[in-house]
Image (cartoon, rainbow, N blue to C red):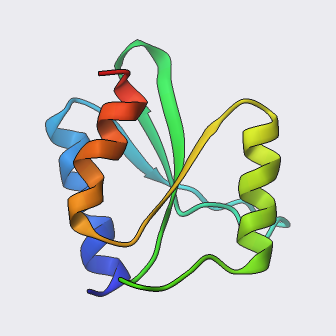
Amino acid sequence: MRESIIEKALSLAVKKRGGLALKFISPGMSGVPDRLVLMNYGRLAFVELKATGKQMRPLQIKRKSQLEALGFLVYCIDKKDQIGGVLDEICGT
């Protein structure tokens, strides 16, 4: 499945739960996750989206580790059926 289809599914699922899935772009810092997911009660996470079966590049793995070291949740989604579980974790349900 193409990354764009998974990304649209994530955005829709987040919206249905009352949150925002903002496109995250950081000029001057390559490898940051694709989306910043903001949910109720101040819950947030970064999400990298990939086509089914694709892996994060080494720089993306480094950025994931940097963000996690700061205490942020960071997920990589490559299948639509992962979205619900990731959102449950973000929301603490």
Q: Residue furthest top?
A: 41
In which quadrant of the rendered view does residue 92 lie? top left
- Asked if residue 86 is positioned above or below residue 41 in the image, the reply reads below
Q: Nearer the viewer, residue 22 or 43?
A: 43
- Asked if residue 50 is positioned above or below residue 53 in the image, the reply reads above
Expressed as whole percent of the image width and height from the top left, the position of residue 58 reads: 77, 77
Expressed as whole percent of the image width and height from the top left, the position of residue 1 reads: 26, 86
Q: Is residue 61 left or right of residue 20?
A: right
Q: Is residue 39 visible?
A: no
Expressed as whole percent of the image width and height from the top left, the position of residue 12 reads: 19, 53
Q: Is residue 76 left or right of residue 82?
A: right
Expressed as whole percent of the image width and height from the top left, the position of residue 33 reads: 60, 60
Q: Residue at x 72, y 59 (%)?
A: 26
Q: Is residue 90 visible?
A: yes
- Asked if residue 8 is positioned above or below residue 38 in the image, the reply reads below
Q: Residue at x 23, y 46 (%)?
A: 84
In which quadrant of the rendered view does residue 64 lie? bottom right
Quadrant where the C terminus is found in the figure: top left
